[in-house]
Image (cartoon, coloured by chain):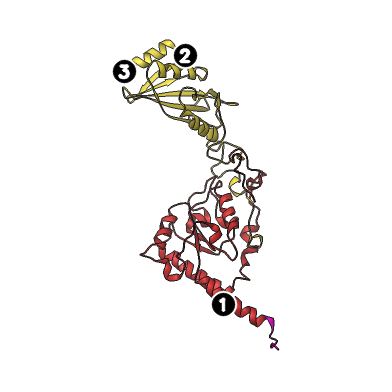
Amino acid sequence: MAIELPDNVITTKLDELASWCRKNSLWPMPFATACCGIELMATGASRHDLSRFGAEVFRFSPRQCDLMIVAGRVVMKMLPVLQRIWQQMHEPKWCISMGACASTGGVFDTYCVVQGIDRFIPVDMYIPGCPPRPEQLIQAIIDLQDKIQREGTLGGREFCTASRQETPRPLVELPVLGSLPLSRTTGPGREIQP
Amino acid sequence: MTTLDEITAAVTSRFSEVQGSQFRGQSRLMVPAEQLLETARYLKQEQSFDMLIDITCVDYLHYRGATDRFGLVVLLANTTESLRLTLRVMLNEPRPTVSSLTSLWQGANWLEREVWDMFGIHFEGHPDLRRILLPEAFTTHPLRKDYPLQGHGERHNFPVIRRADA
């Protein structure tokens, strides 16, 4: 007969093993909208060589990725796209906000630029810089690997009550853009299924 | 070989309300809004201004000494004789309206959509006048000077996705 062990012994070890596997084979999704994307490309290229840390397999389909790297400013017309891509990625998944623009809007404090993507999607790592050096991105990925190993993938939901997302955002009452039905810009036959 | 002075004289004699002026070698015609289409057609068909360079607009709200709200700018070029001409049309609230130039130049289509998007100028006769840059649900025209630089909060008006939702 099998020896009865407490449940937590097995699950903890399995989670640790799974985290160790996952942290060493991150598949980044490059969401590069601006000059940070150039540094992101340099990070993946031979000189800085992200493959030394097991995260070199950039895929352009969110279905195949588990790490989204948002590199560059996100405008209000791009944010629904960003949210859709984030939702299309499978769990477990992580997000790196690369550079000043993705983290805070940077110098672009205008009516159409989102002032930090963490207001609308969860973010695990922030990288300062304009743009950050490839070494900084590599350091962020190493830190994210530590975080994955330390916190596991089952409990990695610590940002769900982040205070930054709790505060009400709109200054005036307006229709929520993402919830409106897609109108004439989406032609016949191009309706997006949720 | 015609010169811009001859063209300006020809236009102002044919359209009595059009005024011509020059500044640093560049010619400009002040055109009333209701005569823009006729003037542009004359310039295209009789004076060989065959190319529409750009259509843009200026908001003169709070501008020193300004009497009109909007100044529409139409830049034309005569490619055979290398001439350039600027048309200015002054427009006012509550409904700044001008006739569309799409019947003369197809390229005016997107240019006029951009001016409509950013300034809210109505182009009568435009085949497809809707926003070109901003989302269609946007409610105002942000390059007007009475629109605040940081907007009315449209940029933060999206649903929030949390870890627990995914």
Question: Residue drawn 56% across and 31% down?
Answer: B120
| Label 1 secondary element | helix
Chain A shade in the render: red
Q: A79 or A1, which lies in front?
A: A1
Report the amino acid beneath label 3: Thr
Q: Does the magenta stretch include residue A169?
A: no
Q: Are marks 3 and 1 on the same chain?
A: no
Q: Quadrant of residue A161?
A: bottom right
Report the amino acid beneath label 1: Leu
* Parent chain of label 2: B
Q: Is the magenta stretch mostly helix, strand or loop?
A: loop
Cα separation between marks 3 and 2: 21 Å
Q: Pointer 1: residues within 10 angstroms few (<14), some, or many (20+)?
A: few
Q: In which quarter of the image is residue B2?
A: top left
Report the amino acid beneath label 2: Glu
Disc 2 or disc 1, which is closer to the eye? 1
Task: Say whether marks 3 and 1 touch (CB < 8 Å).
Answer: no
Q: Point out residue A45 in the picture as x, y percentages from the top left corner.
A: 38, 62
Residue A6 vertical placement versus B90 (above, below): below
Cα separation between marks 2 and 1: 83 Å
| Label 2 secondary element | loop
Q: Point out residue A159 in the picture as x, y percentages from the top left corner.
A: 62, 64
The magenta segment is A1-7
* Parent chain of label 3: B
Marking on residue B3: 3
Q: Which residue was labeled with disc 1?
A: A17
Q: Which residue was labeled with disc 2?
A: B17
Chain B shade in the render: yellow
